[in-house]
Amino acid sequence: MPKLPPLDKNVNHAPHVVLLGAGASIAAYLNWGKKGPRLPSMQDLVEVLSLRTEIQNVGYETDGLNFEAFYDDLSSSGKNEDLIPFLVRNSINNPVPSGNAAQALRA
């Protein structure tokens, strides 16, 4: 895994992306009424953000894909470096499920 740049008094000035798991939010959703669309997890993020085709097109299997582990592998291996900006851009631009993905999540 790449090393972080040196810190300046506990501050890292380098741009970075942090992916967080949604376990606590999903647990809260399941325990407190299940209102609105189901929250995505690292296991179904590829579906929620409609990334399956693009990831498969570069040769990865997407069934049961853990997005967090997949992203870590991409960033640390240096393979398919052009896929990382695509994933980041689509994660930011598609934060809310829509269309068929949202319908499937509500089922």
Image (spheres, rainbow, N blue to C red):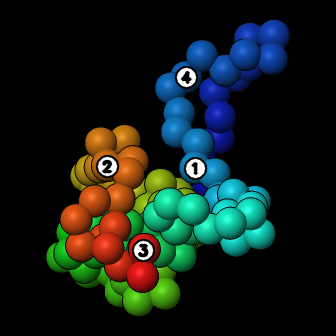
Q: Residue 53: give x, y in percent of width and height.
A: 20, 75
Q: Residue 43: give x, y in percent of width and height.
A: 53, 76
Residue 66, visible in the rendered structure = yes
Q: Helix, strand or loop at disc 4? A: loop
Q: Residue 57: give x, y in percent of width and height.
A: 18, 76
Say which label, 4 or 1, has the lower sequence index. Answer: 4
Q: Where residue 14 is drawn, which disc sits there? A: 4
| Left or right for 85, reference 14 | left
How much space separates mark 2 and mark 3, taking CA atoms?
15 Å
Q: Where residue 94 is drawn, which disc sits there? A: 2
- Decide: marks 3, 4 in contact (CB < 8 A)? no
Residue beneath label 3, please?
105
Say which label, 2 or 4, has the lower sequence index. Answer: 4
Q: Nearer the viewer, residue 83 or 18?
A: 18
Which one is in front in this view, the residue at disc 3 or the one at disc 4?
3
Which one is in front in this view, the residue at disc 2 or the one at disc 4?
2
Q: Nearer the viewer, residue 8 or 33?
A: 33
Q: Residue furthest right?
A: 9
Residue at position x 37%, y 41% from top? Answer: 92
Say which label, 2 or 3, has the lower sequence index. Answer: 2
Figure check: 50 above or below 64: above
How much space separates mark 3 and mark 1, taking CA atoms?
21 Å
How much space separates mark 2 and mark 4, taking CA atoms?
24 Å
Residue beneath label 1, please?
19
Say which label, 3 or 4, has the lower sequence index. Answer: 4
